């Protein structure tokens, strides 16, 4: 059964900001890797269909499928690298309080994916604000 990871997206206010960061910090074709201090004990569940859900300014806005979870280094220098799919899937904006590091997110608690045409021609920021208010 799949298990997800949730993490704050620090330094990016929107999905577009995240994509801009990606373009400036990674060479084309280089895998998208998230580095963390702790390797998840439930990593096997995360690579079995799990995703990384990203929180922007207190709201979950997107997810990326987790492809691999690897520990690199040894002892006090050990770190975890989570390899992510390039595709970013927008999800129903869901409020989430701040936390440090990352957390597990059970499938039952994960926001639903949004259809590509869910908001028609509305700009993404306006659509997000309307969803947060419960008006859409």
Image (tube, rainbow, N blue to C red):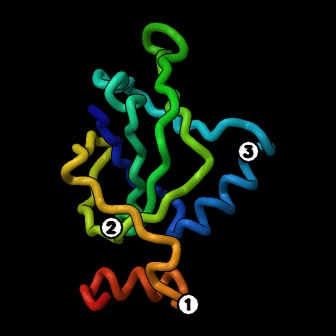
- The Cα atoms of the two marked residues, 3 and 1, are separated by 31 Å
- Residue 121 bears which disc, if any? 1
Q: Quadrant of residue 88?
A: bottom right
Residue 95 coordinates in the image, percent (x, y) = 27, 69
Mark 3 vs mark 1: in front: 1
Name the residue beneath numbered marker 3: 26
Quarter of the image that includes the N terminus: top left
Q: Residue furthest left?
A: 108
Which quadrant would the C terminus be assigned to in this image?
Answer: bottom left
Which residue was labeled with disc 2? 58
Q: Quadrant of residue 37?
A: top left
Helix, strand or loop for disc 2: loop
Q: Earlier in the sequence, mark 2 or mark 3?
A: 3
Q: Nearer the viewer, residue 102 or 69?
A: 69
- Residue 20 in the image: state x and y as whole percent: 68, 62
Q: Position of residue 17 (x, y in %)?
A: 60, 66
* Mark 1 or mark 2: whose residue is earlier in sequence: 2
Residue at 39% x, 62% y is 113
Residue at 36% x, 25% y is 43
In the picture, measured across the screen, residue 120 lies left or right of residue 132, that is right
Mark 3: few/some/many CA within 10 Å (<14, 14-19, 20+)? few
Q: Residues within 10 Å of mark 2 (few under 14, many from 20)?
A: some
Foreground residue among 71 and 83:
83
Q: Nearer the viewer, residue 62 or 81?
A: 62
Q: Determine the CA span between mark 2 and mark 3.
A: 26 Å
């Amino acid at each position: 059964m799949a298990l997800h990871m949730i993490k704050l997206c620090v330094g990016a206010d929107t999905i577009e900001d995240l994509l801009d960061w990606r373009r400036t910090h990674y060479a084309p074709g280089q895998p998208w890797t998230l580095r963390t201090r702790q390797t998840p004990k439930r990593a096997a569940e995360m690579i079995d269909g799990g995703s990384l859900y990203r929180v922007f300014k207190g709201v979950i806005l997107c997810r990326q499928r987790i492809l691999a979870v690897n520990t690199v280094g040894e002892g006090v220098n050990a770190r975890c690298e989570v390899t992510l799919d390039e595709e970013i899937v927008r999800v129903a904006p869901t409020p989430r309080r701040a936390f440090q590091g990352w957390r597990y997110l059970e499938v039952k608690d994960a926001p639903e994916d949004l259809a590509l045409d869910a908001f028609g021609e509305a700009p993404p920021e306006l659509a997000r604000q309307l969803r947060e208010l419960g008006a859409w």
